Image: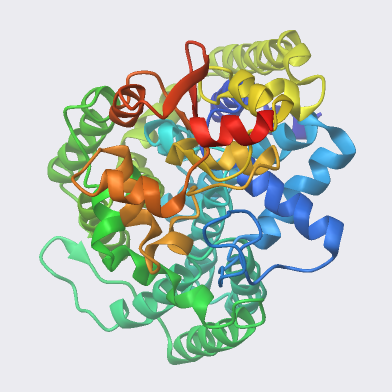
Amino acid sequence: MSWIGRWLRLPHAVLCAWMAWFAVYAMRPFSDPDTPWHLAAGRYILDRHQVPTTDPFSWTMHGHPWVTHEWLFEVVLAALVEHFQFVGAWLLYAGLHALTVLVLYRLGIRVSHGAYLASALAACAATWVALDFWTLRPQLVSYLLFAVFLWLLSHVREGRWGAACLMPPLLWLWANAHASASIGVVMIGLEVLLSFVPSLGRLQRFSLSWPARLHLIGAGGLGFVLGLINPNHLQTFTYGLLSTNKDLVDNIMEWHSPNFHTESFQQVVLPFLIVVFLLLLARRRPLPLRETLFFGGAFAVTLIYQRFLPYTTICAVPLLAAVLADWEESLRDFFAWRWLRLAESVLTAAGVAASALFCAEHGHQVRGPVDQHFSTSAYPVAAVDYLIQHGRTRRLLNAYDWGGYLIYRGIPTFVDGRTDVFLASGVFDDYLALQNVWWQCPELLDKYRFETALFPPGDSIVTYLESQPDWRIAYQDGTAVVLVHQSSTSSAKG
């Protein structure tokens, strides 16, 4: 029964409780703008047994080049949904999160040399603080592999060079699941470079033997070559250069700098960062140079692009575990008392059982097909039903955030969440001019000869089209407005 005693510890109860809460959180209806088109893309690939290299979904860019850098995630998602309905999507969502938390937990233990409770709390905090970014999208694979690479690098530093052998195939997986595989290559390069940096004040250097450095360099090079084995080849590694596009950065929220006036950043992210920095300042012992610089670098990038917040919170885990290890030593002495150890085991068993019951109680929420799990407040479900029933799917001017759902429903989009497809051609600029009713809006309406428009009530373009004699409202509810052009109405009657 000794193995039961080893598992009945407070850190495991903390992990179970957090992963159970997230599993129930993942049962919510879909609301992310991009989830539907990822599912549709995976279904497209499965049906045709090939990865598209040109756009099959929009009517403005149909047949133009499209970098399908997330195809592997999309195929897995679509296959799970095809066989298990919504349960499949939920399993992928909650499973990737659970794996990330467990890897971070093991990473914290290794870096802190046994700070189990601190590692569990830090691992849970990492995903809680960045919860807004943990949606069912391919980035989940990137977060997991980022954590795995930190864990593997800690093994290599301890002389376990075999861990480097896992990096090349993981880089191939990363390159085919999300276009952030260059992060893995950069991590390996930084690990080697930082091994030459001497101690800086309180930042204590780490040692890395030459064989370990050579193993890492070889793993990074081979991983890069393997990563080129994908439908997009080098573009998978260069896709991140889109962050230099001003239109993308200025208009897509996840590419903005953090807004610390928003509720999530003000009440969750900012307090977390303050706690981390205070703990670093308060520690009298030397700080680990590698973990501190990784966290500082990720934080600096996050200040430019808020979408990198999950990487910052992940980098905080080994740093927090190392810093809090001092405090946990005294806590271990406290729990050395036999009766307290028994109480811990009882409380842990109760916590694990409660977590399991919590999941079971909400299990009914994952039943049924995916179509029943789209949020009617986030997506224009009823309005799209109207468009399909009345044959209003041609030359549609649609809201950007609804493009993904339209793709899922089989309606060609004017623009959608695959922003890169529309940037070079100028379609994205034209969409901004139409949505915001800039001076060239009338000219663009004539240029594209729209037959239908689909936007949220109150949008500027809706107000403008309502005032035009050749446009009228055909359908409206609390989520969406459908407007039709008179010439298309006449054609339909004819």
User: Which quarter of the figure is the C terminus placed in?
Assistant: top right
Q: Please tell me whether residue 214 is drawn above or below residue 149 in the rendered image.
A: below
Residue at the farthest front position: 494
Q: Nearer the viewer, residue 452 or 321?
A: 452
Residue at the farthest left position: 201
Residue 391, percent across and down?
A: 70, 32
- Is residue 389 shown left or right of residue 296? right
Which quadrant would residue 427 be assigned to in this image?
Answer: bottom left
Instruction: Give me the residue at 25% from left, 30% from top.
Output: 265
Instruction: Give me the residue at 18% from left, 35% from top.
Output: 274
Q: Please tell me whether residue 367 is drawn above or below residue 276 in the rendered image.
A: above
Instruction: Give me the residue at 31% from left, 55% from top.
Output: 429
Residue 388 in sight here:
yes
- Is residue 96 shown left or right of residue 396? right
Residue at the farthest top position: 361
Instruction: Give me the residue at 17% from left, 42% from top.
Output: 277
Q: Nearer the viewer, residue 437 or 186?
A: 437
Residue 148, percent across and down?
A: 55, 59
